[in-house]
Amino acid sequence: MAADEIGVIGGIDTHTDLHQAAVIDGIGRHLATEQFETTPEGYQRLLEWLRSHGEVLAAGVQGNGAYGAEIARFLTLNQVTVVEVDRPADRKSRRHNG
């Protein structure tokens, strides 16, 4: 990592047609949020977008075994550390707690 480049962490909420991605800096400050199509081109744009904010230290991906499988595989192949993020099992709790 260059001296003037910050380390960032991505978070990806996966869905059928669009993935919602967010990026934070090393101390947890939200930098940006964006949606990307679930296509090879969309995955490439997502990765470029993450890297435009700094050195990507890792990416948390929801649903690596389902909707997130392809983006997790793509990021791993592009030397991004992927961490699986579980969502709360209780859907009602998720909606009330964001």
Image (cartoon, grey):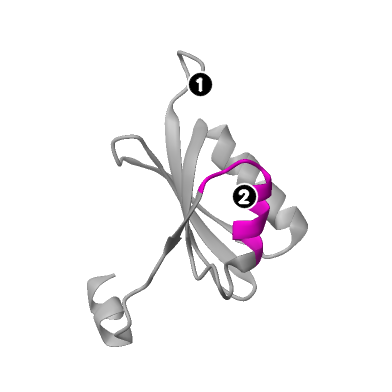
Residue placed most toward the observer, 22 or 1: 1
**Residue at 43%, 43% in the rendered image:** 9
Q: CA distance from mark 1 to mark 2?
A: 19 Å
The image shows residue 29, relative to residue 34, as above or below, that is above
Going by the image, does 83 lie left or right of 16? left
**Residue at 56%, 73% in the rendered image:** 65
**Residue at 51%, 31% in the rendered image:** 55
The magenta region covers 70-81
Residue 59 percent location from the top left of the image: 48, 49
Residue 2 percent location from the top left of the image: 51, 16
| Residue at far top of view | 3
- Which residue is label 2 attached to? 76
Instruction: Count neighbours of disc 1 (C-alpha within 10 A) and say few if under 14, some if 14 to 19, many if 20 or more.
Output: few
- Which residue is label 1 attached to? 1
Count of picture labels: 2
Q: Say which amino acid is labelled 2.
A: Thr
Is residue 72 located in the magenta-colored stretch of the structure? yes
